Amino acid sequence: MTVTGLGTRQRRRRRLPIIQIFSALMIFGAIGLFVIELVGFSQQQERLPADVSVAGVRVGNLLPREATTYLDESYSQPVVLYYHDNPILLEPSAVGFRSNNEVMLASARSTRDVEASFWLRFFNYLLGRESEAVVDIPLSADYQQNLLEQYLRDVAARYDRTAGDAEFDLQTLTLRSGSGGYVMDVDSAIPLVDAALRRPDNRIVQLPIVEAAAQSGNIDTLKNMITAYLDSQGFIYDGQTSVGSVFIMDLTTGEEVNILGDVAFSAASTAKVEILIDYFRHLWFPVPQDEAFLMANSLLCSNNSSSNLMMEIIGDRVSGQRDIFVGLQDMAENTQYIGAENSYITAPFVLGIEGQQLGSIPAPQTNPNPNFSTDADPYNQTTAEDMGTMFEMIYDCANYGSGLMAAYPDGEFTQTECRQMLELMSANDLLRLLQGGIPVGVRISHKNGWISDMVGDAGIVFPPNGHDYVIAVYLWEQAEFQDFNRLWPLVEGVSRAAWNYFSPETPLVAPRVDLPETAQACDNFLPPADLLDLNNINGWRSGS
């Protein structure tokens, strides 16, 4: 019995297999952890890859619906447009902006390494290799560009400030610059806003604004000032009993003021410019001194007898006979040819002496403005536009070898002859009319004329700044006798307005007070016959 009891105690003392149990637990734990990770990895396949962003938005490890919400929140934020310092909110929906989320998320899912085996991707998952690099899926979105352009143009319409129009002052007959302005450059703004719509952040755009310089006035402003000036003086330039005609040409740019420039007027002595031009056309040798003196009397003193003699000389050079009517016919044809199509002289100037040969040639076909009548002389007519054309032709010939020289390319005119025409008429020192509207001492080559109901003056002004211009002014008012205090100051006012436009740095802000009551006599400026020099018309004064 003793032996049996000892064996029983020895069996009860045998130890538990701790190591084996622990190992089993570790194995079961590892299996459980593996299962958990495997389940988690399986569930993770529904989410986007950790290494992806869509349209600049990090959406890794998000479910598609979560990523869609995140994308919508990012790209539905308004774009802030700044017009100068004014913020304007552009809601993407206002231009039909829509992101293609399904397309982008499909591209995001495709970045997963689908070619690798399940267990290889699981192994990479366990090692955390999926998050080592980020792949960005480009934005896929669209909107209606026409809505964006219209939106920006609406903004421009609200915020743009165009430069103010130039104004004029009828008291000083000067121009004033308008206020400055600014406008949006819509074409440049469109790509800037487009880029902001396609960004998830920094959705701010400073709109491109172009400063618009203040308008300093143009030739149309001068035209408006002249018509307003005539109206302010009680002269209706387009009336039934009064007509005003103004032609001005900028000889630098070719721009024009043309106020009823095609209305026919009595040319009076301004027609003597036609005689001057045709005389030189038939001159093939230097001007004889006696003929130069005839020209000076005709152009400076408006002497009708000298003018008739010049037309006889033209007739003699055309036909070999001293026939004034041959001269008249040649002048009419030449005047039409050079572009003064509504101007003509068809009869000698009346001298009021016994025995004068009278008569006329047929008037050429003309086409002046039929809507206005100035009771123009049927034998001697012109328009402001025609007189401006003639002076422009002389000027271009004298300065550029064109004008009359281009019209007659066979040597009928030379630059020297055209310069002599301008030089001669620059001595026409009336002190009134066009000359009375410019500063003392400024060179002007011009020819004037007036009768009982009309006054006209046309020529070229040569300001010191070199901005030369042609100006022709004709005014008619139904009256039995012309009052020098009525129409003459109006011509001077128009001349002053033109001067202030072309020479704004030295304006005449008030009418000159040093003018005589009427034109000074030509005895004060007609050169002596033996000292007359067509290349230096005033040289006789100093003996040079």
Image: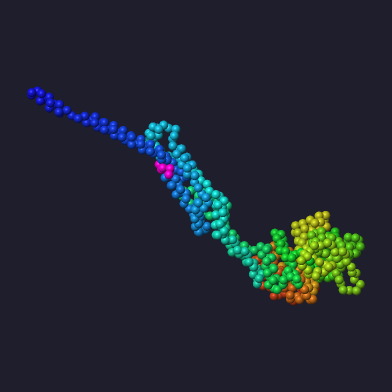
Q: Position of residue 528 (x, y in %)?
A: 82, 70
The answer to which quarter of the image holds residue 231 is bottom right
> Does 341 appear above or below 25?
below
**Camera-side residue: 131 or 503?**
131
Identify the image's colour scheme: rainbow, by chain, secondary structure or one colour.
rainbow
Looking at the image, residue 375 sits to the left or right of residue 82; the answer is right
Looking at the image, residue 71 sits to the left or right of residue 298; the answer is left
Q: Position of residue 524 (x, y in %)?
A: 78, 73
The answer to which quarter of the image holds residue 11 is top left
Visible residue check, residue 204: no
Q: Position of residue 224 (x, y in %)?
A: 68, 66
Decide whether the magenta segment is chiefly helix, strand or loop.
Answer: loop
Quarter holding the C terminus is: bottom right
Residue at position x 79%, y 74% in the image: 452
**Camera-side residue: 286 or 241?**
241
> Does 235 appear above or below 26?
below
Visible residue check, residue 225: yes
Residue at position x 42%, y 45% in the image: 66
User: Does the magenta run of residues contain 27?
Assistant: no
Q: Position of residue 212 (x, y in %)?
A: 59, 59
Query: Magenta region: which residues?
Result: 61-65
Query: How many numbered tags mark residues here?
Result: 0
Quarter holding the N terminus is: top left
Residue at position x 46%, y 48% in the image: 72
Residue that extends furthest to the left in the rendered view of this protein: 2
**Camera-side residue: 337 or 107?**
107
User: Does the magenta run of residues contain 62?
Assistant: yes
Residue at position x 47%, y 49% in the image: 75
> Does 152 appear above or below 538?
above
